Amino acid sequence: MATFHFDLVSPAKLIFAGEVEQVDVPGLEGDFGVLAGHAPLVATLKPGVITVFGDGQPRRYVVLGGFAEVSPEGLTILADVSWPFDEADPQFIQGRIEELEEARDKLEAERKDDSERAQLDRAIEKLDHYKVLDRTLQGDLTH
């Protein structure tokens, strides 16, 4: 299978750089896979798991958002926060879920008209992404 260059970068460090065969990405508009020769694109990431295929076993990384750019040079993911899947802290994710639930509840209580519905919808969507990530970390889902 053809390979391409992949970089996974967070503000703190370069997490992964190398030649890979495929990367599965949690896009906000829907999950997608990247292979060599993929059409150029820029996508926003949702909280989720990136799976990297290459030599040996697939590698998995948790991301909490960011951007992916596919170019002729390969794939670059600029993650807000990222770490290897086996180093993920489920308590951190659970704490984030609780914060998002409080924010959602506050938005629901303060909503006076439908013009504020979009903000509430975004809060609910983000909460749902974190809940799926939490279930993934607990082993209830596979990617």
Image: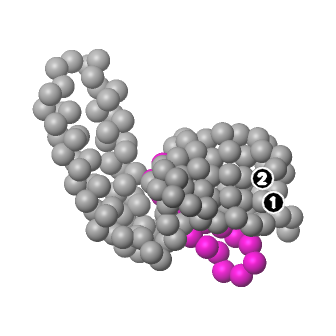
Q: Which contiguous range is marked in magenta?
A: 46-60
Colouring mode (rainbow / by chain / secondary structure / one colour)? one colour
**11 to 51, vertically: above or below:** above
Q: Position of residue 118 (x, y in %)?
A: 34, 27
Asked if residue 53 is among those painted magenta in the image, a careful observer would answer yes
Residue holding disc 2: 74
Q: Amino acid at mark 2?
A: Gly
Report crowding for label 2: few under 14, some 14 to 19, many 20 or more residues within 10 A (C-alpha).
many
Question: Would residue 142 be visible to someone looking at this image?
Answer: no
The quadrant of the picture occupied by the C terminus is: bottom right
- For marks 1 and 2, the one nearer the N-term is 1
Secondary structure type for disc 1: strand
| Residue at left offset 40%, top offset 51% | 129
| Residue at left offset 74%, top offset 67% | 18
Residue holding disc 1: 4
> In which image quadrant can residue 50 be found?
bottom right
